[in-house]
Image: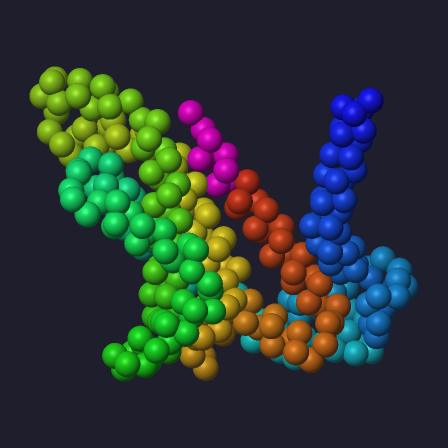
Amino acid sequence: MRRYWSKRFLGLYGTLFLVFVYAPIVMVVVFSFNSNPVNMMIWSGFTFDWYWTIFGYPTKLNEQTLYVESTSQLLAAVKNSLIVAVSTTTISTTLGTMTALALYRYRFRAQRFYQGLLYMPMVMPDIVLGIALLVFFVSIGLPLGRISIIIGHCTFLISYVFVVVSARLAGMDETLEQASADLGANPWVTFRRITLPQILPGVIGGGLLAFIISMDDLVITYFIAGVDSTTLPLFIYGMLRRGVKPEINAIATLMLALSFVIASLGLYFRRRQ
């Protein structure tokens, strides 16, 4: 009897937990198709007009009330986010992979301490890291803009790539590298034909994870972004300060879909044998 009620309680708890976590996300997606231009919480019918409005196409709804102030500003924010995300992913994936390989192959006295420093950006509150980066950039005289955002994102995304690639290296078969060296291959050939193919799923997974985190980051970007370097999360935050508008739900749904696809690819490549 006790086991029966324990299972029922755990099942109820798991269901309520999933509802608590995912119900707000489902509401955002559902109300992004609401045709009510005044109060999004009152369902007035199904429409795709808010998605068309995002890209500047005329619709019946935005003839009555136009919420997106400037489609060109939105597209500029998307462009900034993509430039920052691609640049950050390239740099952080390269440096994170190199760091993971170095710590995997070599042993030195302060290795544990160095690994702890690599984990710090992941556990540090975003607002603390954002303020620290802002003070640092102002101190050295670096103008706030895309460059500062890329540098700021790399400071913590390298840690994410390091963790993913390190997990992949932990399961790598070292005997293949030893066999390659015994057969006369130099270190570069061994890395290119033996090591890299084995850790490539982890590298791709870490890169995709870095890309999606960079695209979605708001707190740190808010502190280190310049006037002409507004990213998509900052643009949405600016719209939210004037009220929750229908287009915000549509933009959030598109970002959610993109995040889901990229995160799924990252998990797939990370677990791929």
The residue at the point 57 percent across, 73 percent down is: 235
In the image, residue 265 lies at what x, y percent?
A: 51, 40
Q: Viewer-proximal residue, 221 or 68?
A: 221
Main secondary structure type of the part rendered in magenta: helix
Residue 237: x percent and y percent?
A: 60, 72
Task: Tell me, yes or no, if residue 140 can be seen here.
Answer: yes
Which color mode does the image show? rainbow
136 sits to left or right of 268: left
Magenta stretch: give its range.
Answer: 265-273
Q: Please name the residue shown 39% across and 62% down the image.
A: 153
Residue at the front extreme, as displayed: 2
Please check the rendered image and state whether residue 101 is part of the magenta-colored stretch, yes or no: no
Horizontal arrangement in the rendering, residue 197 relative to residue 207 (left or right): left
Quarter of the N terminus within the rendering: top right
Q: Is residue 256 left or right of residue 128?
A: right
Above or below: residue 205 compared with residue 186: below
Report how many numbered discs are placed on residues in the image. Answer: 0
Q: Is residue 31 above or below residue 183?
A: below
Q: Position of residue 260 (x, y in %)?
A: 59, 46
Query: Is 236 rendered above or below residue 178?
Result: below
Q: Nearer the viewer, residue 44 or 124?
A: 124
Give the vertical position of 91 relative to 134 (above or below): above
Quadrant of the frame with the C terminus: top left
**Residue drawn at (33%, 38%), measured in percent from left and top?**
166
Q: Residue 3 sits in which quadrant?
A: top right
Residue 87 in view of the camera? no
**Residue at x 40%, y 49% (from the top left corner):** 160
Left or right: 236 in relation to 133: right
| Residue 69: quadrant of the picture | bottom right
Question: Residue 189: percent from the left, percent from the top?
Answer: 17, 30
